[in-house]
Amino acid sequence: MKRKLFLVVLVLILAIFLSGCGGIVLPTTDEAKIKSVINEYCLALNNQDWSKAKSLCVYGSLAYNELCEMEANFNNAYLYCDVITINVVMDIQNVSIDGNYATVYIYFNLLVTGCGNEDYAEEGEGEVWLQKVGNSWKIY
């Protein structure tokens, strides 16, 4: 009797586990995609992964061009300092979507250090603009 009960419980546990891994994909909302892009962008900046950050921007946009300028400035700064860190945090307050365009209202905190010294710090609020390109959102 104990063996049958054990097998029934084992089958139920297996059924529950497999139903959770059944490949059910919930639809991702545009708002969730937008928040993901903002968070990936911050992570790319913090890691100084310029290629990744650029891939999250509309090519040739203001954001893309400013990012290229930032990369060039950091590359020049590495001539004088071996260790440069970026710590940027964007706290998303609101997402407003209008068709293929979105505005994200954020509070941000930015800290750049070079050779262990605080070189630049800024915090405040602002907006990030995004454009839907295909099925993806990109910063522009």
Image (cartoon, rainbow, N blue to C red):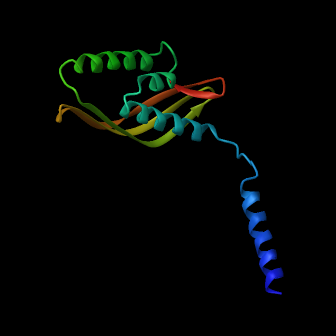
Image quadrant containing the N terminus: bottom right
Total label count?
0
Q: Residue 109: which quarter of the image?
A: top left
Identity of the residue furthest to the top in this view: 60
Instruction: Spot the residue most to the front.
Output: 3
Give left or right: position of 122 versus 3: left
Point out residue 13 in the picture as x, y percentages from the top left corner. 74, 68
Residue at x 48% of width, y 42% of height: 94
Apparent side of residue 128 relative to residue 111 in the rendered image (left or right): right
Which x, y percent locates residue 82?
22, 26
With 136 as the anchor, is 104 left or right in this view?
A: left
Name the residue: 19% across, 24% down: 81
**In the rendered image of this protein, does residue 117 appear above or below residue 27?**
above
Q: Position of residue 115 (x, y in %)?
A: 18, 31
Q: Residue 91: x, y in percent?
A: 41, 43
- Viewer-proximal residue among 32 and 124: 32
